[in-house]
Amino acid sequence: MPEIHAARRARAQELIRESGADAALITARPNVRYLTGLASSNAALLLPAEGGDAILATDSRYAGAARRDAADLGLLEERFIEEKLATEASRRGIRRLAFEAHEMTVERHGELVARAEGVATLPFGRKIESLRLVKDAEELEKIAVACRLSDAALAEVLPQIHQGMSERTVATLLDHAMTLLGAERPAFDTIVASGPNGAIPHHAPTGRELERGDLVTMDFGALHDGYHADMTRTVAIGSVDDWQRDLYDLVALAQEVGIAVLEDGVEAGAVDAAARDVIEAAGHAAHFQHGLGHGVGLEIHEAPMLGYGRTGKLTDRVPVTVEPGVYLPGMGGVRIEDVLVVTAGDRARFLTSTTRELLVL
């Protein structure tokens, strides 16, 4: 929808003016898509601080999509997009060009400076990411659809999981189910970690076969129209020991406590601290070493980050994950993760809906 992207560019132009630049060169792919609507592996946007004469550059593979999805923008069809836009900035008389230093390599910046004759460059910071933090209604619906697809895929796969099935097979079933249900593709590489592998938070699925008494952690999500879902459930195979149920109940409580403080205006670090305190009080401080959660949207991990020492307040219409975990080396682990949206004047709203009770398959 061109009007949505035009409104986003207008807000971005305010940030360009505040930075003291005459224009900004936007090169991070999610940011280009956010401001133009174009999904491309090779695209950049030259956005002036004033006026609407922005130029979108991409190569011939995506030129047709650019004309369709960003018809209100000037199009530069070129393979070497950054160098060409740097030359264009110089030709236009731009004297101060902001660039996304967090995304651009030193080598690419050197080429940019060499082409942008008479142009001084200055880091723009993560200003477009700050715009992306609060989602509009259309974005929230896309994330909600991605979450519904993820829930539906798990509902299809759970009855198929059994002893003797490999981690890799479970991951393949989840990926296949999400795609058949309508996802573009999995939002990231699906994690399936069984038994002692569950102690590795980002374990890559292997040929290990599920055994009776295993805890199995499945971390996965669907991608819908560019927007990501991210959910985790841990289940038991055949039976569950007391220590496993206690561990599961601890993680579930930590998530519940973290979600209870997830509201408009809360400090990001306070959400992490609420859940982390529960785990630390149970003697597992050393077994929960990642952050409590993160934002989701055009990227699977984006601002805000919910972690120890993180600053900044959460506001209305910000979607985040809440994913406490406890990982016991050599034994296994538990992680439970949901996507929620911070809502003004009310409790955070779940976008994932699969039961958080411990299932014994």
Image (tube, rainbow, N blue to C red):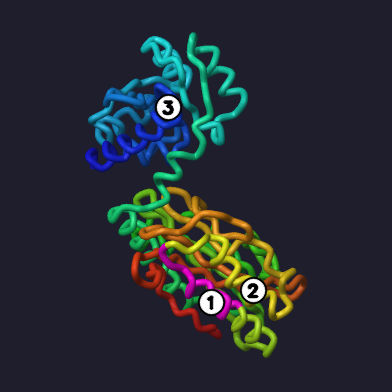
Residue at x-position 56% and y-position 36%: 102
Task: Look at the image and say whether residue 260 sits in the magenta stretch.
Answer: yes
Crowd around label 1: few <14 · some 14–19 · many ≥20 (10 Å)? some
- First of labels 1, 3 by sequence position: 3
Residue at x-position 48% and y-position 76%: 158
Quadrant containing the C terminus is bottom right
Numbered disc 3: secondary structure:
strand
Q: Nearer the viewer, mark 3 or mark 2?
A: 2
Residue projecting furthest to the right: 330
Numbered disc 2: secondary structure:
helix
Q: Residue 155: percent from the left, percent from the top?
A: 42, 75
Numbered disc 1: secondary structure:
helix
- Mark 1 touches mark 2? (CB < 8 Å): yes
Please determine whether, in this image, residue 195 is positioned above or below residue 206.
Answer: below
Q: What is the span of residues highlighted in magenta in the rendered image?
A: 251-264
Residue picked out by circle 2: 277
Residue 24, numbered label: 3
Q: Residue 346: percent from the left, percent from the top?
A: 35, 71
Report, in whole angstroms, how far the alpha carbon at label 3 lies from the one at label 2.
Answer: 43 Å
Q: Residue 262: percent from the left, percent from the top?
A: 46, 68
Q: Nearer the viewer, residue 16 or 112?
A: 16
Residue picked out by circle 1: 257
Residue 171, numbered label: none
Q: Main secondary structure of the magenta part?
A: helix
- First of labels 1, 2 by sequence position: 1
Report, in whole angstroms, how far the alpha carbon at label 1 lies from the one at label 3.
Answer: 42 Å
Amino acid marked by disc 2: Asp
> On the image, which quarter does residue 143 sit in?
bottom left
Amino acid marked by disc 1: Val
Report, in whole angstroms, how far the alpha carbon at label 1 lies from the one at label 2.
Answer: 9 Å
- First of labels 3, 2 by sequence position: 3
> On the image, which quarter does residue 217 sit in?
bottom right
